Image (spheres, rainbow, N blue to C red):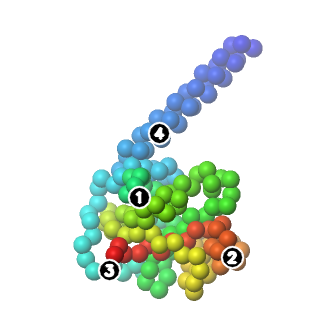
Amino acid sequence: MQTALKILGGFVGLVVVFVVSVLIYARFHDGPIAIIAGGPFTSGELYQGPEPDWSPMRTRQEVEFQLLEPARSRITWVAEHEGKPYIVSGYMNTTFGKVWKQWPHEIEKDDRILLRVDDVIYERRLVRIMEGPMVAPVINQLAEKYLDGASFGDPDEAVRNGDVWLYEVAPRA
């Protein structure tokens, strides 16, 4: 019995060391690694032109963005409506969301981000949207794109009550 417990303890210890190692590695990696937040962008070319055409975001699955403070990056879903890109953070009123989703709270302190799309980096900011005519079309587009048409319920209510935090990816002033 004690031998089995020692083997199990050793296995659990190895798993913990592996997970911690991956998390530490990710913090220094150029961008996120799947669902694991990554380090600051070290590759990509800074965009220096007029406001880009965001319409390809309608069919694109994901983009990467990096907070400036703290300098961490992640992958997120993206939508486009009337020429503007949008991203969301779901599950915000769940225990899982409250533990896992820290970046929306960090955005409240500093809304500046770097958005990386196809190795091009755009200096932007995230503006939280609480209501408006864009809410339902954007949330419905995201549901159709990622949830096989399943619904978030009433999109306006989901955003208004904070289940879903919706952001416009806006130019910096």
Residue at image position (50%, 49%) is 36
Q: Residue furthest left?
A: 48
Q: Which residue is mark 2?
A: 157
Characterize the local packing of mark 2: few (<14), some (14-19) or many (20 or more) Cα atoms within 10 angstroms. some
Q: Is residue 7 left or right of residue 54?
A: right
Residue named by callout 3? 51
Residue at 68 percent of width and 57 percent of height: 94
Whole-number angstrom distance, CA of label 3 to CA of label 2: 31 Å
Q: Are marks 4 and 3 in contact (CB under 8 Å)?
A: no
Q: Residue at x 60, y 21 (%)?
A: 10
The amino acid at mark 1 is Leu
Q: Is 132 placed left or right of 86 in the picture?
A: right
Could you tell me the amino acid type at mark 4?
Answer: Val
Element carrying mark 2: helix
Residue marked by disc 4: 22
First of labels 3, 2 by sequence position: 3
Q: How many badges with numbers are in the image?
A: 4
Asked whether residue 50 appears in the rendered view, the answer is: yes
